[in-house]
């Protein structure tokens, strides 16, 4: 059997994605009951971090422990990657020693090069192109609170970044409508928009995007690695692109609010929204743990 990787949501079929979301809910219930579930005993996850992280590291490390396995943290300071070893050579060696690899990096090409030479599954813990693990958690949270997302409307407010790209992929896979509102010059990459044709609409008016939406979501205006652009980006976004109570009032009364975190209250989101009754942000964050456990089970053949 060929090795399965998870570099983008599109590495899964719609049915596989739905099964992982369902399984994540089952694993969450198992954990809350206090039941022991350790199908990955003797398995090791190698975690390569070129970008810093809180939720990604903790959720994968704890997730492997809960499943009975072990996680190994590797930063550029701890590996030969930091001293110029080719990605391909690291992949060839590491994949002979561990059972699965998670990489959090800048260039998506790094993941593609690594996976092409890996004997074991490779998971994208975040790249500049996409953040598929976060979408697993987001989709699980929506399913928990509102049921099937098929046919629903999601409003993305803000930068057309890696999170936006992953929402576009999700819309195409799970058959929902995505409205993306962003300032001119900050639109999502045309490759993703073209691939999501029929499911995504790009606009500049955030209130129009939110009108009647079932879910409103956003992210920071300057992602990791864009700190030098902070002032310019704030000037472009601040006037219209904060998700506040007035914008949420445009959405369906039962709409939920999501944010992948970390959040900057008073910038991309108002405190009254992220800390308000429509916010499911904390469930969303917790679900990184359980959704990734479901993904690990799937890739390692512990649950089909």
Image (tube, rainbow, N blue to C red):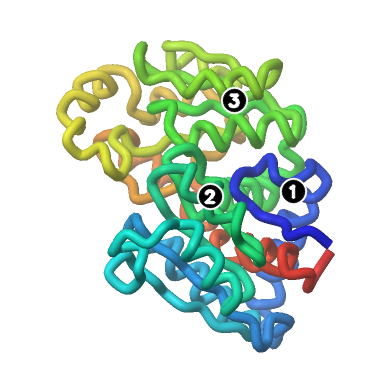
Query: Which residue is labeled 1 in the image?
Result: 17
Say what secondary structure mark 1 lies in. helix
Q: Where's residue 150, x and y in %?
A: 76, 33
Where does the image place residue 9, in percent across and percent down from the top left?
Answer: 65, 43
User: Disc 2 versus disc 1: distance between alpha carbons?
Assistant: 24 Å
Which circle's residue, 1 or 3, is located before the other in the chain? 1
- Cα–Cα gap, marks 1 and 3: 23 Å
- Asked whether disc 1 touches disc 3, contact meaning CB atoms under 8 Å apart, the reply is no
Which residue is more in the foreground, 63 or 151? 63
Closer to the eye: label 2 or 3: 2
Q: Earlier in the sequence, mark 2 or mark 1?
A: 1
Which sits in the foreground, 93 or 67?
A: 93
Residue 112: % across, % down? 55, 47
Image vertical order of residue 227 relative to residue 70, above or below:
above
Residue denoted by label 3: 213
Residue 273 figure quarter: top left
Q: Nearer the viewer, residue 96 or 214?
A: 96
Q: Tell me the residue that label 2 is attached to.
A: 113
């Amino acid at each position: 059997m060929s090795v399965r990787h998870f570099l983008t949501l599109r590495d899964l079929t719609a049915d596989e994605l739905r099964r992982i979301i369902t399984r994540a809910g089952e694993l969450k219930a198992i954990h809350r009951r206090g039941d022991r579930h350790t199908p990955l005993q003797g398995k090791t996850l190698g975690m390569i971090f070129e970008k810093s992280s809180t939720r990604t590291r903790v959720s994968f490390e704890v997730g492997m422990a809960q499943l009975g396995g072990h996680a190994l943290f590797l930063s550029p300071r701890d590996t030969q990657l930091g001293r110029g070893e080719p990605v391909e050579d690291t992949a060839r060696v590491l994949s002979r020693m561990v059972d699965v690899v998670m990489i959090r990096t800048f260039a998506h090409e790094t993941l593609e090069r690594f996976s092409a030479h890996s004997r074991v599954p490779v998971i994208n813990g975040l790249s500049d192109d996409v953040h598929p693990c976060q979408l697993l958690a987001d989709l699980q949270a929506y399913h928990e609170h509102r049921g099937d997302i098929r046919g629903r409307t999601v409003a993305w407010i803000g930068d057309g970044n890696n999170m936006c790209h992953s929402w576009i992929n999700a819309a195409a896979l799970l058959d929902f409508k995505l409205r993306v509102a962003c300032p001119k010059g900050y639109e999502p990459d045309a490759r993703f928009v073209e691939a999501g044709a029929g499911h995504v609409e790009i606009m500049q008016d955030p209130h129009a995007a939110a009108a009647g939406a079932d879910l409103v979501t956003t992210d920071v205006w300057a992602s990791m690695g864009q700190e030098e652009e902070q002032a310019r980006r704030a000037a472009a976004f601040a006037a219209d692109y904060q998700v506040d109570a007035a914008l949420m009032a445009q959405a369906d009364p039962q709409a939920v609010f999501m944010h992948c975190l970390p959040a900057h209250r008073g910038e991309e989101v108002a405190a009254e929204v992220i800390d308000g009754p429509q916010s499911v942000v904390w469930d969303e964050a917790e679900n990184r743990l359980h959704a990734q456990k479901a993904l690990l089970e799937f890739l390692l053949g512990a649950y089909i």
